[in-house]
């Protein structure tokens, strides 16, 4: 199915999401260290959740791999779930590649993007696959364009928007606000 036919297949109003992320890397020695993420998956939800993960970092120049564990909190409901999270990023001269695997008791998520530089902008494609591990969680697959840019004068802050079209006819328009903390 082509991207255009996925867009035409979308039947519902888009699900707008605002995701805030803070990324930290603390190199210790020999390209290894500690990595951590704080993520509010969707600040537009009535009861926003918070993901906190941390663990082992392997870094070479601007590329890295992170092997982490943590918790997804739903403070309003007083509920939390354990999480395993693997993230990898490779920065090339012409292409950036990112991949992520996340396990929670109710679902597995695999996401990725590939972007190409266009000045301060990066343009590319984003994917997200969800495997429901409980009957209450539906499996799904989404694909769509992605555009990101660093804020002038604030190179640690990146704003990204993607529009992913799902095989079930849904559309997710997600804006990411990413702050990269560098010690």
Image (cartoon, rainbow, N blue to C red):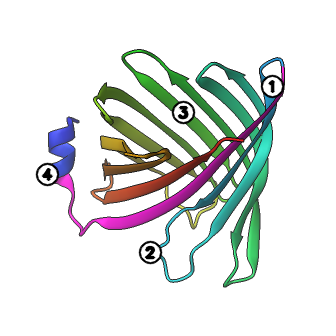
Q: Which residue is mark 1?
A: 32
- Identify the magenta region: 8-29
Write the residue at 33% across / 49% down: 162
Q: Which residue is mark 2?
A: 44
Distance of label 4 from label 1 (alpha carbons): 46 Å
Q: Mark 2 Cα within 10 Å, few/some/many (few <14, many 20+)? A: few
User: 107 above or below 13?
Assistant: above
Q: Which residue is mark 4?
A: 8
Label 2 SS: loop
Judge depth for marks 2 and 1 and give the one in front: 1
Rendering coords of residue 37 (x, y %): 67, 50
Distance of label 4 from label 3 (alpha carbons): 27 Å
Q: Mark 1 Cα within 10 Å, few/some/many (few <14, many 20+)? A: some
Distance of label 3 from label 1 (alpha carbons): 19 Å
Q: Mark 4 Cα within 10 Å, few/some/many (few <14, many 20+)? A: few
Of 71 and 108, which appears nearest the observer? 71
User: 169 above or below 4?
Assistant: below
């Amino acid at each position: 199915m082509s991207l255009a036919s996925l867009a035409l297949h979308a039947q519902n109003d888009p699900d707008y999401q605002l995701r805030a992320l803070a990324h930290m890397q603390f190199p210790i020695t020999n390209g290894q260290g500690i990595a951590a993420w704080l993520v509010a998956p969707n600040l537009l939800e009535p009861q926003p959740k918070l993901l906190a993960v941390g663990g082992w970092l392997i870094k070479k120049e601007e590329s890295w791999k992170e092997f982490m564990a943590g918790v997804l909190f739903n403070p309003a409901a007083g509920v939390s779930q354990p999480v395993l999270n693997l993230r990898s990023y490779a920065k090339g001269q012409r292409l950036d590649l990112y991949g992520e695997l996340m396990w929670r008791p109710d679902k597995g998520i695999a996401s990725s993007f590939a972007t190409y530089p266009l000045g301060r902008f990066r343009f590319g494609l984003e994917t997200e696959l969800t495997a429901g591990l409980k009957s209450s969680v539906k499996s799904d697959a989404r694909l769509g364009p992605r555009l990101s840019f660093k804020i002038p004068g604030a190179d640690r802050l990146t704003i990204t928007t993607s529009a992913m079209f799902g095989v079930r006819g849904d559309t997710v328009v997600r804006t990411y606000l990413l702050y990269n903390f560098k010690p």
